[in-house]
Image (cartoon, helix red, strand yellow):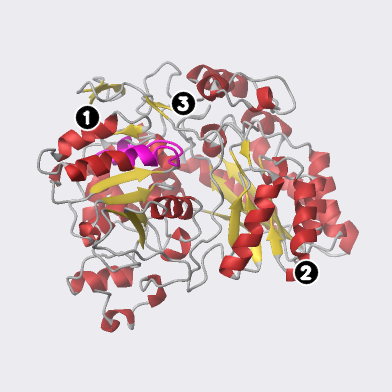
Amino acid sequence: MAYPDSILFNVTKPARYTGGEWNSVVKDWQKTDIKIVLSYPDIYEIGMSNMALPILYEILNRQPDVLAERVFAPWVDMASAIKEADIPLQSLESSHPLSEFDVVGFSLGYELTYTNILNMLHLAKIPPLSGDRDESHPLVIAGGNCALNPEPMADFIDFFVIGDAEELLPKLLDCLREFKSKKDGLCRKELLKQLATIPGIYVPSLYTVEYESDGTFKSITPTVHEAPQVIKRQIVAHLPPPVTKPVVPFIEATHDRAAIEISRGCSRGCRFCHAGMTYRPVRQRSHEEVLEAAGEIIDNTGYDEIALVSLSTSDYHEIDKLVEKMIDRYGERNIALSLPSLRLMVDSVKLIDSLPTGRKSGLTFAPEAGTRRLQRVINKCIPEQEILDTVSAAFERGWKSLKLYFMLGLPTETDDDIYGIIELVEKIRAVGRGISGRKPNTRLSLSTFVPKPHTPFQWVAMDSEENIKRKQNILKSGLQRKDVNPSWQDYPRSLLEAVISRGDRRLGGVIYRAWQKGACFDGWGEHFKFDIWLDAFREQGIDPYFYTQRERHPDEPLPWSHIDTGVSIEFLKREYKRAIEGKETPDCRDHPCNACGIEKATNLCIYKNS
C-alpha cells in the first residue's frame, strides 16, 4: 500500500517517494521468487545520480525470477511522518515494506551515510544489528567503494560484496535460489556459510577480531572453514553493456542527465586517491559501443544531455575523436555532451570548447597542491606553466569563471605550500586580467585531506584541527586581498570521515550509539551534530583521535588487511616511501609497468595490453 496522501501532501518533494517513473520496472510480486531492494542511504536526488544502482537494477531485473526495486533515505520530514504514522519504509516500485524482501542491499559510497543505513533499517522495522535478525528478516548486504574497509559496519551487515558485482551476482542468485527451495532445512547461518564460499563475499559474523594490549589491531581470523582468510576484490575483465534504459526521475536529480560509463579504473597513481588505487585496472569501452548506447539512451529517456563518465575522462583512448563522432551522429538532435573529470591541460579546454553545449559559464579543475614539491609527494604533477596555459586558453575562448580544488593537510605539507596556493591563484588571475581586462571570477574549494585505506597514505596521520584552521586563516587572509573567497568543509566532519574510513570493528558500537542519540544525515552540514558523536565515543570508551592522529608503521596489521584489492601491499609501501622522498611515479600508460600487483591479480595490466 502506497504512502497516504495525508503524508505526501505535507513533506518536501513528495515525488521522492511515489515511484512510477519512466522506465521503472514493476514485476508481479506473487509470481517472482527472489525479491531484492536496492537501497541508497541518501536522498532520492543523490541516489538517482549514482552510477552503480542502474547497472545492478538492470542486471537483476533481467532475471525472470528476480525483481529489483529501489528505496532511498527519506528526508527528515518524511522519516518523522512515517514513524509517527507507524508505516514501515517501503520500496518505490510496488510500495512493499522492506521487511518483505529477501535482500536489502546498500551502496556504501560515503562514510557519513552510515547512520542513514541504521535509520532506514529501523524505519523498515528490520533490526539494525545483524545479530538480532532471524529467518524472518531479509538479508542485509552492502557493496561499494567504502566496503573495501567493511569493519566499521560489520555489526550491521550480513555480508559484503567486495569489488565489481556484475559477475558475482549470478552465483549469489543461485545460492539464494537453493536456499529458498530448501528453506525448511537450511538456516540463515548455513546460508551465510555457503555465501562465504563465493569469491568476493565477506561474511563478518564468521570471523573473530583480536587487538593488542595498546588498542592497535592485531588480527582477523575465520571461525569456520567456509570463510577464506583473504577476500579478493572481484574485477570484471570487460565492462558490462551500458545501461540504455535508465529510470528517469520525476524531479531534478543532482546529475540531471543521462550517463555512459566509458571506462573504469585509472592508472595515474595519485597517492591520495582511493578510487584511483582500488578501481584498477583500466578497462574501456569501444567508440562504437558508446555511440550505440548514446542513441538508445536518447530514444529511451528524452534526455538532451549525455555525460561520458570515467575517473579520468582525458585518458580515454582518443576521447577527442569519440566526441567528434558523437557530434557527427547526434548533433542534429541538439544533444549536449558533458565530460566530467578532465585533467588540467590545454587539450581539455579545447575538447570542452568543441562540445555542442553553447554554455561557457565556468570550468572546474583540481590542482590539489600549490607547489611542485607537494605535487611530487602526492604524485599529481602538473607544471605551473601548463596550468597557466590552460587558464589562458580557457579565458581566450570566452570562459568567465574558474573553480579550483585544493587539499589542505597533505603529508609533508608546510606553510610554503599554502603560500604556494595563494601565489598560483594570483598568477591565474593575472592571466585572466591580461586577456579580458578585468578580474576573472575565481573560486576555491579547499578540502581537508583524509587518509584512506588501500592507498600509499593509509599509514599517515591526519593533520590536526589547529593546523588546518591556521592554514585556512593564511589562505583567507592572502586571498581576500585578491577578491577570492575560499570555501571549505568544517573539520569535525572530515575528522569523523577519517575515523570511520580507517576504523576497525569497535566503531560499530559508536555508530550505533550515535544513531540512537539522533545522528542522521551526517554528511549534511545542517544536520551534523558532532557533540552526539563525541558522546558516543566517550560512552564506548574509544578515543577518535587514536584513529587519526597516530602515524602507523608500514608493517603494522591493518583492520582491512583481509581485503585484497589486487594492488599489492609492497607497491603501496614503495609509493609511501617515494612520497616521503618527494619522488614522482610516472603513469604506466606511457612508461614501464610500475608493478602495482594488478597484472598478477588479473592479467589485465594496462601497460601489458597497450
Residue 194 image point, x, y percent: 24, 32
The residue carrying mark 3 is 459
Q: Amino acid at mark 1?
A: Leu
Classify 10 Å Cα crowding around label 3: few (below 14), some (14-19), many (20 and above).
many
- Counting residues from the N terminus, which is met first, the one under dot 2 or under dot 3? 2
Q: Which residues are magenta?
A: 151-172
- The local secondary structure at tag 1 comes to helix
- The local secondary structure at tag 3 comes to loop
Left or right side of 486 for 512: left
Residue 442 counted in the magenta span? no
| Count of marks overlaid on the render | 3
Residue 160 counted in the magenta span? yes
- The local secondary structure at tag 2 comes to helix
Marks 2 and 3, how far apart in space?
53 Å
The residue carrying mark 2 is 332
Q: Amino acid at mark 2?
A: Glu
Question: Quarter holding the N terminus?
Answer: bottom left
Classify 10 Å Cα crowding around label 1: few (below 14), some (14-19), many (20 and above).
many
Q: Is residue 156 visible?
A: no
The residue carrying mark 1 is 206
